[in-house]
Amino acid sequence: MVSKHRYMNNTVSWLLLSHNRTADRGDLLPRVLWNTAGIQMNSDLVTAIETTDHRGVFNLFDIYSKGRHLCKDIFQTLLGTWSADGGFRLTPNYSPYKIRQNFNFLQLRGVTVIDRENVTSGKVDQLLGEPGLTKGIVAFVKYHYALLVVLRDFHNFTIKFRPTRGWAGRLRSGYRLGLLGVVQRHETDVAATGIIMRLSRQPELDSIHYSWAFETGFIYKITPDIGSKSEGNGFVAPFSLPVWVALLLSLALSVLVLQYLARLSVDERNTRATMAYVLDVMACVAQQGVPNVSRLVPTRVAVIVLLVANLVLYNYYTSTVVSGLLSSQMIGPETIAQVIDSPLLLSLTDTGYHRILLREQTLPYSTRMHERKALPPRSPNDLPLFTDVEHAVPYLRRGGHVLHCELTEVYPAIANQFTANEICELRTVEGLYRYDIRVMAFVLPKHSMYSELFKITLGFIFRLTPELNGATRETSYLSPFTDTTWYSVASVLALVLGVLQCIAIFHAELSSRARNHYLIDTIGLIAQQGTAQSSAYISLRIVLYAVLIMAFLLYNYYTASIVGELLSSSNQGPATIDQLLNAPLAVMFANDSYNRALAVQHARVPGAMTSDRIYADVRTAVQLLKLGGYAFHCELTEAFRAIASHFDAHEICELRTVSRRFDAAFSVSYYPGSIVRVTFTVPGHHTLPVWRRKVVAMQFVA
C-alpha cells in the first residue's frame, strides 16, 4: 500500500521500530525495506534498531534511496541513538539535504523537445549545448537545459536524454503524445525544457521553477509601401529642402551686406576681396568669430546678428533631433488584423507549435491568416512560410516581410545585423499566442522524488526605495566617457601635437614660436574657441580644422549619450546576496520548515537568526514589501500571486529579485574559528578557489 500510493514522501513522517535482533529475524527489516518500492530520495523515514551490545539502546537510521525505480540501493545513515534513560542523542549538525545532495554519478532519465529527424540520445547534449540558435530547438529549451546543467553539476548526476518532436498531443484513444506524455507516464525523471503550466496540467506535473516569459509576436520593418514617414537619414532630417535653401540665401545675402557696408564707408582701406567676406561668414557659421574685426559699427552689428542667428540654428537642430526621436511615430500595422491585411509577406519560425497552429487553426485569426498569408504561392526568391531566424533577418532588413516568432530569439540576430536607424524602424505586434504569455515552468513527473531537492527557486524579493539608490538614481556626468573613449581622445591629441611640432620643424619661421604654443592652440580648439594666430600653410590649417571637427563630434556624442542614458537606463538595486546584506533592508523569511531548518542547523554560529520575528507569512510580507525597506526570502511562485493582488503596475515595476542559486555553486566546509577554503564553481568551467579566511560567523551557506 505504501508503494502504490506513494506515501514515502515528505508529507508523512515514518518511524519503523524493530524487534530484538535474533538469528532468525535479523534480516527481516532489510527485506521489508528492500521490498518497499516507495522509498524515495525525499522520504522522511527513520528506523530504530536495538543494539546487540546494550539492551534498551536503539540506533536511529535515516533511510532513503536515490532511485528505487532505477534499481538503486537503499542507504541508511546514523542519525543518533535513543534510550529510555538518556533520551535522544542526535548527530550534531545533521542535515538530510547534505546527505542526499550528492547523487554519485547516478544516471537519470531526461526528455527534451528537438524538432529534427534522426536525433539520437547521444546527440542531445551536443545540440543543446551549441551557442546561439539551433535548427529545431527553440530558445527556452536551451535556457532550461542550461539550468539542468547547473543542477547536474551541483548534484553530481548524469542524464540520458530521450528526444521528442513535440510538447503535447493526443490520439483518439486518449494516449498522450510528446514530452508531456512521457512526463505524465513517469517514463522520465526530469524534463530538460520548459512548458506553459496550464491549469489542466497541474494535476499531472510538478513545477519546480518558473523562469522564462514565453512571448511571441510579429516583427517587421517600416517601409514606404506600408505607411512609413521616415526620411531615411536622421542626421539631416531637421533640415528640409526649404531650410537648406533659406540658409544658403541668407549666407549669400550676408556676404553681400558685409561687402556693401564696407564700400559705403569713407575709408577705402576697409574694403577687401569678396573671398575675405565669404571666410568671415563661414567663421561666424562655425561660431569661431572673425579674424579681422571691422571698425564700422554697422559691420559689427551685422556680424553679431550672424553669430546669434547661427547659434539659434544650432539649438533648433538639437531640439528638433531630440524631439523627433522622442515623439515621432512611423505608421504601420498595429494589430494582428492589420498585419494580415497589409502587403507584408508572412513567415513563421520552423517550430512544432507553429505547424500545429496552421494545421489545427484553433486560435483567433489563425484561419484568416492561413487563407490570406499561407495559401498564396511564393516565388523562389521570397522567404519561405516556415524558416529560421538567421535566414529571416536579412529579409526583415530589406523590408516587406513580417516574421512571427518568439521575440527573444530574433532580438540577438537583429542587434548583429541592423544599424541603429534600422532598429528604430522596427515594429512589433502582439502575437497569436498573446493569451498564453506566461512564465514557462521547469517540470518533473507528479510526486517526483527529486522535487524537493530541485526546487531551489528561492530568492530574495525586495522593492526599490530611494535609499537603495533606485528611483532617485542620477546619471553620472562622465558616464559616456569610458576608458576606451578617454584613451582614444588622448591618443588623437598626442598625435595632433606631434604633427604640429613636425610641421614647425620643416618651416623655419614657425620653429621660433614657444614650445607650448601648439598645446595652447589645441586646448583652444577643443574648447571651440579657435586659435590665437592664423597660419598661411594649408597643411597646418587642415590639422587645426580636423581638431575642431573632432571636438565638435565629441560634444555631440556626449550630449547624445547623456540623453540616451537618461531615457533608457533602468533602476538599480542589490544584485547579489552580499549587496543585499549591505543594503538598508530588513530581511524576512517565509514561515516554512526549510527556512526554519536553516536557522536551527546553524543555531550555534554566532549571529545566526533564530528569532520568530524574522519569519512571516506571504500575505504579511507582501504588505511590508509594499511599504519598502524589506527583503523577503521565499519561494517566488508563492509571493507572485499575492503581489499581483496587492501591487499596482508601477509598484510591480519597482520589484527586484536576487537569485539564490543557479548562477554558480559555492562549496565550503568550516568550523567556527578554523581556516576555511571556499571554492566557486561556474557551469562549464573548472572549480576555482575564492579565498581562505578564519571563520567567525557565517549566516548563509549553500
Image (cartoon, rainbow, N blue to C red):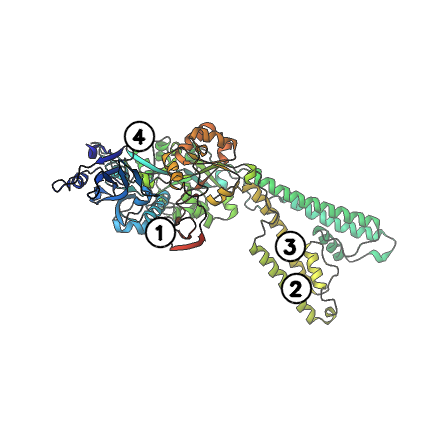
- Which amino acid type is shown beneath numbered disc 1? Glu
In this view, the residue farthest toward the front is 85
Dot 1: what SS? loop
Residue at left offset 76%, top offset 46%: 305
Mark in front: 4 vs 1? 4
Residue 431 visible in image: no
Work out how far the residue at label 4 is from the one at label 3, CA to CA, in angstroms.
Answer: 64 Å
Q: Please give the label number shown on residue 96.
A: none
Task: Using the image as rendered, state which of residue 621 and residue 272 is in the foreground.
Answer: 621
Work out how far the residue at label 4 is from the one at label 1, CA to CA, in angstroms.
Answer: 33 Å
Residue that label 3 marks? 551
- Which amino acid type is shown beneath numbered disc 4? Ser
Work out how far the residue at label 1 is from the one at label 2, CA to CA, in angstroms.
Answer: 50 Å
- Counting residues from the N terminus, which is met first, the one under dot 4 or under dot 2? 4
For this view, does 176 lie left or right of residue 575? left
Specify the quadrant that holds the N terminus. Answer: top left
Q: Residues within 10 Å of mark 3 (few under 14, many from 20)?
A: some
**Where residue 62 sits in the image (x, y, percent)?**
26, 41
Mark in front: 1 vs 3? 1
Specify the quadrant that holds the C terminus. Answer: top left
Residue that label 4 marks? 200
Residue that label 2 marks? 497
Q: Residues within 10 Å of mark 4 (few under 14, many from 20)?
A: few
Residue at left offset 45%, top offset 52%: 694
- Counting residues from the N terminus, which is met first, the one under dot 1 or under dot 3? 1
Task: Using the image as rendered, state which of residue 445 and residue 491 is in the foreground.
Answer: 445
- Counting residues from the N terminus, which is met first, the one under dot 4 or under dot 1? 1
Contact flag, marks 4 and 2 (Cβ < 8 Å): no
For this view, does 55 lie left or right of residue 508? left
Residue that label 1 marks? 130
**Where residue 588 sits in the image (x, y, percent)?**
45, 35
Contact flag, marks 3 and 2 (Cβ < 8 Å): no
